[in-house]
Amino acid sequence: MPELGNPRGISRRAALRGLGGLGAVSMVATLTGCGVPAAYVEQGSRSARDRSAGEPVVDFANWPLYIDTDEEDETKRPTLAAFTERTGVKVRYTEDINDNDEFFGKVSPALMNRQETGRDLIVVSDWMAARFIRLGWVQSMDRQGQPNVARYLDPQLLRPAFDQGRRQSVPWQCGITGIAYNRKKLGRELKSTADLWRPELAGKVTLLSGLDEAFALLMQGNGTDVTRWTEDDFHRVCDQVRRMVAKKHIRRFTGNDYIKDLSTGDVLACQAYSGDVVQLQADNPDIEFVVPEEGGELWAESLMIPNLARHKSNAERLIDHYYDPEIAAELASWVNYVCPVPAARDVLASSGDEETAALAEDPLIFPDDDMRRRLATARDITAAERATLAKEWNAIVGL
């Protein structure tokens, strides 16, 4: 196992995850209307001859700043080196993904035309993973070759609506959408989504601009079961947000720039991601994160094997490597997101390093039972719903 590193304040931010708007939908509509084959790919044409045995490599595309690095040489990634040392398989690692919709546009022509993407393993947000799965663009995994995934994957992440049983996607890292606030400047606790609308917060609240990032928490504030929300639930949220915009209660809609607003005190409360707040608290202990009483959204960014990947077995082995609790602990100690391997908690707790061991007690990395009861994974927005809902949301946000 690589030596556990001290936690770092690195932010691989979800503002880079895309706005969840019409771009990718338009891409498919345009291509399918110009003589390109239909977007959906049938099961029989998704796999290619697996060259893993004769080519000990795997091409892994990920987001920037989303993996552990050596403190003295940031081009070195200890957990990848450990995989190569153990298996002999070299990882060609690229930080190739900066935005979900942008990446969709980058690989969609190849996938729609039954061509290789040049990548054996990719990481996208679950709402985008749902789109890839609906289009038939990724392969099912052989779980017999993934004993760690079968044993250690967090049961709360096992059955998203878009991939029951996680046969085509496996969480890389997870997070919680909740409320962050400056307790010292606000002078009180926030416990509920409804607290965002209190008069004393007028002009001091921000919401996330991305449709897929924002809607679930707001629905939960209304008591909606987000695993089975309806369009009526969505329109109700939009009506509420419009009223708050008209009253100038909402300061603005943000990507990850809410971090700066919260740090400076320009904003007192906001929709936020748990991983950001772990990092913010290192510099400002007055910043609090709360999963509202009505609930918060548990989301993931997941590993998938695209169609016609040349090294499918090697990709499956690499995924399973990261579900070894010791490797998962090493990764968690660097990225500070919710770890999808609960067994990594014991590894961190017994690390012998006080700062690292403290991560095992952080509910924003390893949620406790009380927090878990308030977490839910929202069903994804279907292809039929997306254009209409994105148009309505983006009109409010001003995109």
Image (cartoon, rainbow, N blue to C red):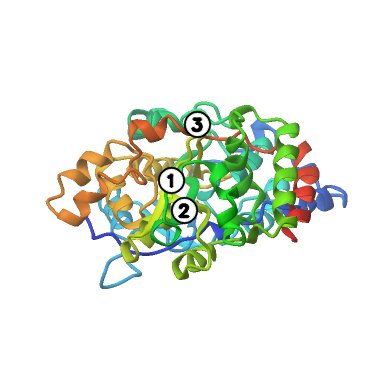
Q: Which quarter of the picture shows residue 40? A: top right
Measured from the top left, where is residue 152 in percent x and y? 33, 32
Q: Nearer the viewer, residue 248 or 18?
A: 248
- Mark 2 residue type: Ala
- Mark 3 residue type: Arg
- Mark 1 residue type: Val
Measured from the top left, where is residue 203 in percent x and y? 61, 62
Q: Residue at x 60, y 49 (%)?
A: 197
Q: Quick one: label 1, few (<14), some, or many (20+) residues within 10 Å?
A: many
How far apart, in angstroms, are the residues tagged by discs 3 and 2? 30 Å
Q: Residue at x 83, y 47 (%)?
A: 32
Q: Residue at x 71, y 56 (%)?
A: 245
Labelled disc at residue 180: 2
**SS class of the residue under badge 3?**
loop
**SS class of the residue under badge 1?**
strand
Q: Nearer the viewer, mark 3 or mark 2?
A: 2
Q: Which residue is mark 3?
A: 166
- Please say if the residues under marks 1 and 2 sit with CB atoms less than 8 Å apart: yes
Q: Nearer the viewer, residue 270 or 272?
A: 270
Report the side of 29 relative to 153 (left or right): right
Q: Which residue is mark 1?
A: 290
User: Which callout, 3 or 1, points at the residue further toward the start of the chain?
Assistant: 3
User: Which callout, 3 or 2, points at the residue further toward the start of the chain?
Assistant: 3
